[in-house]
Amino acid sequence: MTHPRISNPDPQQTAYDRLARLGITLPPPPPPIANFVTHVVEGGMLYLSGQGPLEANGYLHAGKVGGDVSVEEAYLHARLVGINLIAVMQHALGDLSRVKQVVKLLGMVNAMPDFLDHPKVINGCSDLFLDVFGTAGRHARSAVGFGSLPGNITVEIEAIVALRD
């Protein structure tokens, strides 16, 4: 499984230019699955609720990483989660140029008890954010394993983003 990467994002390009270069069309932001909102803007920060690996056609990737889902597949699922997070950013902000800095990601992996490669999985989202936002996509991060996630999804990721005035 391969995916395009941008080795040295051009600082003159916008996030939209980079998305196009990667062949990514943002889907509509996924709706919340319970009693919460997809995002909150407060004090110059955008807090994004956790998103899962939901395809634009409604298919949700499920399974246990390190069991019936490989690290490579889960990496692509985390990349898809990153696309969904960017879709929520676009919806929340109206313009991705308002992203000053991706500050923090929390990546949760639905993993087998003996699975050890959580960071390799969440790199799917981290790599995408670097490709799309350049240096503003570099972030602090936690990548942790869970015994289960809602709907048995493979990956869930939430983000905190600093905004331009």
Image: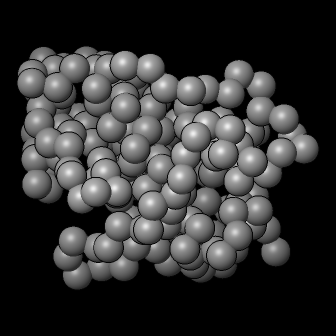
The C terminus sits in image quarter:
bottom right
Left or right, 20 with reference to 54 = right
- Looking at the image, residue 90 lies above or below residue 159: below
For the view shown, which residue lies furthest in the right direction? 12
Left or right, 64 with reference to 32 = left
From the top left corner, tell me how far across and down residue 162 is, in percent: 68, 62
Q: Residue at x 31, y 51 (%)?
A: 55
Q: Residue at x 55, y 74 (%)?
A: 91
Image color mode: one colour
- On the question of residue 163 being in view, the answer is no
- Looking at the image, residue 119 lies above or below residue 49: above
- Looking at the image, residue 96 lies above or below residue 113: below
From the top left corner, tell me how far across and down residue 62 is, in percent: 14, 42
From the top left corner, tell me how far across and down residue 93 is, in percent: 64, 74
Q: Quadrant of residue 18?
A: top right
Q: Nearer the viewer, residue 33 or 144?
A: 33
Numbered circles on residues, count:
0
Q: Residue at x 38, y 38 (%)?
A: 78
Q: Residue at x 23, y 81 (%)?
A: 35
The N terminus sits in image quarter:
top left
